[in-house]
Amino acid sequence: MGNDLPVVPEPKEPTRRRLYVLAIQGMGALMGAAMGIPAIAYLFSAPRAPQESAPGQSNGQWVEAGDVASLTPNEPVEMAFRRNRVDGWKVISEKGSAWVVKRPDQSITAFGSQCTHLGCAYHWDDGKDQFICPCHNSLFSLDGKVLAGPAPRPLDRYETKIENGKLMLGTLRESSGSQS
């Protein structure tokens, strides 16, 4: 008196149930591949190398700081700009600024916006005709030289060039320790 139920063999021809099961398994495989392939590519591919720097450029790029025609000789102006930085897979847009001085001979100097003492932000004082760092009282002349205070060296300078009337900034170069 074992098993009185008859055994029904699986039909060899396609059935609707078999079609649904195969379709569901196929969709699962596609979804797994759609999520798995990018994850595997991310894990096993190397990050993008930084772009090669050409001489005198920061990561091969010059950034536009502003219009040269708006500058008045011997009147420093703080100009803001945006620069892209590559960090692995990410491209980060960073805001920066520079103090720009146009000379009577039409040459242009762009100073980094941090004091060379501890990296504080400094400003131009029209009444004293000096750059002043309020944190530790460093004073700088119009040409970036240290006049007083604990700053160990002149203000750092950007490489500059003019294209189509626009000031372009390159690499920020650390100034030398001499005060000449």
Image: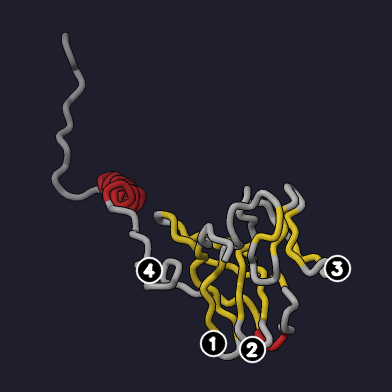
Looking at the rendering, in which quadrant would you find the C terminus? Answer: bottom right
Q: Is residue 148 above or below residue 4?
A: below
Q: Residue furthest front?
A: 180
Q: Is residue 124 above or below residue 25?
A: below
Label annotation for residue 105? 2
The residue that label 1 is drawn on is 163
Q: Position of residue 150 (x, y in %)?
A: 66, 49
Residues at circles 4 and 3 in contact by the CB criterion of under 8 Å: no
As rendered, which of 83 and 28 lies closer to the eye? 83
Looking at the rendering, in which quadrant would you find the N terminus? Answer: top left
Q: Position of residue 111 (x, y in %)?
A: 61, 67
Mark 1 or mark 4: whose residue is earlier in sequence: 4
Looking at the rendered structure, the kind of residue marked 4 is Ser
The residue that label 3 is drawn on is 127
Q: Position of residue 158 (x, y in %)?
A: 54, 70
Instruction: State the separation of the CA atoms marked 2 and 1.
Output: 18 Å
As rendered, which of 162 and 74 lies closer to the eye? 74
Q: Residue at x 16, y 49 (%)?
A: 13
Q: Nearer the viewer, mark 4 or mark 3?
A: 3
Instruction: State the separation of the CA atoms marked 1 and 3.
Output: 33 Å
Mark 2 or mark 4: whose residue is earlier in sequence: 4
User: Is residue 57 visible to the viewer in this orientation of the structure?
Assistant: yes
Instruction: State the separation of the CA atoms marked 2 and 4.
Output: 31 Å
Q: Quadrant of residue 104?
A: bottom right
SS category of the residue bearing label 2: loop
Mark 2 or mark 1: whose residue is earlier in sequence: 2
Instruction: State the separation of the CA atoms marked 4 and 3.
Output: 41 Å
